[in-house]
Amino acid sequence: MFRPKLFDTLKNYNRQQFSKDLMAGIIVGIVALPLAIAFAIASGVSPEKGLYTAVIAGFIISALGGSRVQIGGPTGAFIVIVYGIVQTHGVNGLIIATMMAGVLLIIMGLARLGSVIRFIPHPLIVGFTSGIAIIIFSSQMKDFFGLKMGALPAEFTDKWSDYIAHFSSINVYATGIAVATVLIVLLWGKLTHKIPGTFIAILVTTAAVSIFHFPVETIGSRFGAIPSSIPTPSFPQIDFATIRSLVQPAFTIALLSAIESLLSAVVADGMIGGNHKSNVELIAQGTANIFSSLFGGIPATGAIARTATNVKNGGRTPVAGMVHALTLLLIMLFVGKWAALIPMATLAGILVVIAYNMSEWENFRSVLKGPRSDMAVLLTTFFLTVFIDLTVAIEIGMILAAFLFMRKMIQFSDVRLLSGEAGENSDEQDKEMISNYQVPDGVDVFEITGPLFFGAAYKFKDAMKLVEKTPIVLIIRMRHVPIIDATGIKTIEEVYKESKRRGTKLILSEVHSNQVMKELKDARLLFAIGKSNVITSFTEALERSRLFTK
């Protein structure tokens, strides 16, 4: 059940596949280099922390994961939450939150919640993904235009107010480099996918700045030299107060990691015709985040773009992902000092392209054209992500989606009195059905349609009030009741007790759902009502009712 995909793929592994995995891993490692640095800087931490994460977490996710081709590492989805944690709790708080998120992910995997995570509503995912894209785009304007200003405010509106106030300090050289980066990344993909456009953009712009000495800020001028070694692991100082304050952001990290990694795995399955193990993937993600935090890294998850690059270049086993991590390690050890020459405007240009790709504007527009309930979830999550907080956006988005779903289920549920004194309100089809079945006098028939849960139970209670004259027998048809919850069981129990008090015999007809039957047994209602009065056929229920009306 929890066996990593690596062990399955190595059974028939051969030299030819290793060559493909090796080439794919090297290419993905080159692609991941600027992204790891850019995501770290945008998250408010030093660039090497992104590299540590890509190396350590990337290797573990591939080695222990449940997908054949998943590539793990830092992603844009975490920028917002990581930046907020660093601003509020510092780097130590981020390390603790990442470790806590790793533990939560392992618990999710062991509890087999992998399949449940995939049921998160699509409008909610599109809403917060688009919101994150807007925030990433907004956070890059300082470096994109080379503005001379202090630290960026955390609030979205404050950022843009500061941009407008300092726009007169624009650096045309930085702007030119950023625009050139965007054009190279966008246009290079039309020429070839063998060499990533981001890598070409970094080479061209870094060379231009070094040769012509453009007055622009670089990674080195802002952060200093990038370390050329992996640090020794260290355990952060933890106290109960810190853990309590970080529970909410840790849960957000875990949820985002679970959602993005499993979405990436699903996309990868579609590309290779595979079948990932969702619970194994969650455990691998959790383990990777724990070890990443021990080395000072940031949160990691499955990266859809890098996973797709891996597949397109021939990667078909976790070996490719492990090679990608080792490639990054070698680059950091031997070429890392040259990364300090990369202009900040180049990274800003790359992140602007990433933000555009993350925006999912086509999906956004599609959801807006759909049902109003989906539109409400989308816009609520989007605006809360942009203007309030990502954690709040997910929580309220989930609650809103749940309430709107319950509302739909309530609309789907129906309770009708098909006979008796109130039968005059029944439609012609109901009257014809009752006539054909020859319902005896003194017998009332109710039919429940849809799930009988707490949101719809009031309909049943209101329908029961329509009975003016006490019937001899009350038949409740449940052929279209797929599920019942505790409130539904309580409602049936109340009807039974009221019927017993009034001397009415209660018969439950056509209880076809195994879940409903199990709940009746567990609540001992089956025993109270009597097994002979819980009948699978409406005709037999009528025959049973005649025994009491003679």
Image (cartoon, helix red, strand yellow):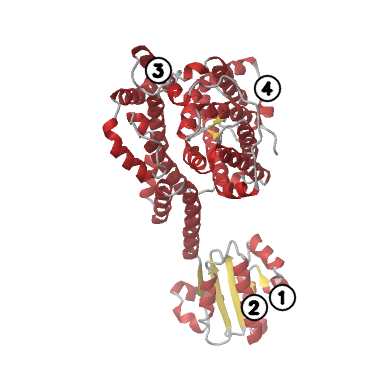
Q: Check the image and name the residue furthest to the top.
A: 211
The quadrant in which the N terminus is found is top right
Q: Which mark, residue 496?
A: 2
- The reply to whether discs 1 and 2 touch (Cβ–Cβ < 8 Å) is yes
Q: In the rendered image, which quarter is residue 130 located in? A: top left
> Where does residue 36 sit, x and y in percent of width and height?
50, 28
Indicate which disc, 1 or 2, sits on the residue closer to the N terminus: 2
Indicate which disc, 3 or 4, sits on the residue closer to the N terminus: 4
Left or right: residue 63 compared with residue 199? right
Q: In the rendered image, which quarter is residue 319 located in? A: top right
> Where does residue 129 sit, x and y in percent of width and height?
44, 42
- The reply to whether discs 2 and 3 touch (Cβ–Cβ < 8 Å) is no
Q: Which mark, residue 544?
A: none
| Amino acid type, label 1 | Ala
Q: Which residue is mark 1?
A: 528
- The reply to whether discs 4 and 1 touch (Cβ–Cβ < 8 Å) is no
- CA gap between label 3 and label 4 equals 44 Å
Question: Mark 1, residues whose alpha carbon is within 10 Å: few (<14), some, or many (≥20)?
Answer: some
Q: Secondary structure at mark 4?
A: loop
The answer to whether one can see residue 409 in this image is yes
- CA gap between label 1 and label 3 equals 81 Å
Left or right: residue 269 compared with residue 42? right
